[in-house]
Amino acid sequence: MLLTTCLSLSPSTAPSSSASSPAIHVTWALAAGGRLGVGNDPRYNKTRCFEPFPFPDGTEGQKERIRQLAEALDAHRKRQQALHPDLTLTGMYNVLEKLRENQPPSVPPGQGGRVGFAPSPDKGRAGEGLRLAEALTAKEKTIHEQGLVSILKQLHDELDAAVAEAYGWPVDLADEALLEKLV
């Protein structure tokens, strides 16, 4: 739910749209936000998670690249939901997270990607389909196909790499190092 809340921010909401980059902003929100309910679930609070968030002070070129990627991400999600009315953000992001769980937890040097996550080592090869088939249920495979979740992942990886670059940080920072740099 926290991820979906963060993702509901429009690309124009943040000065540089880095709140559209879950890898950095969700790490921040999990540390700064509150908890609620029996399961102690994370809760996104605008005054604690968004307003004090230290947005990067990148160059105009970096900010434009982030805006373009955030808009492409937003357009992709809206387009796929328009084509498939039963498709939800929560469904797409649950499948995305399941795919990420099956990845090595680091980014190889020179291969940008989401902070803390590596691009699929078998991207574009037959092995990726086999790994995907093993990881997803039939319902999740349908969501993956309708939501074009691999494209969603690629857009997030590119956006996260662009945001990390705007901060002047490597893309493979551990959560603890990320939080130290943000505060």
Image: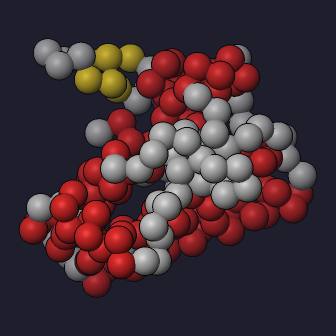
- Left or right side of 67 for 98: left
**Looking at this view, is 150 or 60 the one in front?**
150
Camera-nearest residue between 75 and 23: 23
4 or 131, nearer to the observer: 131
Quadrant where the C terminus is found in the figure: top right
* Residue 13 in picture, x, y percent from top left: 60, 50
Structure colour scheme: secondary structure
Q: Residue at x 34, y 50 (%)?
A: 102
In the rendered image, which quarter is residue 68 located in? bottom right
Q: Is residue 20 visible?
A: no
Q: Is residue 65 left or right of residue 2?
A: right
Work out which residue is located at the far front of the displayed protein and give it.
Answer: 127
Q: Give the total number of marks visible in the rendering.
A: 0
Q: Residue furthest bottom?
A: 83
Where residue 95 appears, x then y in whole percent?
A: 27, 57
**Residue that appears at 63% across and 50% down:** 108
Residue 129 in sight here: yes
Q: Position of residue 114 (x, y in %)?
A: 56, 49
Quadrant of the image containing the N terminus: top left
Q: Relative to the observer, which residue lies in front, 86 or 21?
A: 21
**Which residue is at a point 43% across and 77% down the rendered structure image?**
125
Above/below status of 67 relative to 13: below
Query: What residue lies at 9% left-to-right and 68% top-to-bottom?
Result: 138
- What x and y, as percent, mark residue 134? 19, 61
132 relative to 138 in the view: left or right = right
Establish if 40 lies above or below 134. above
Compared to residue 165, the image places residue 172 above or below, namely above
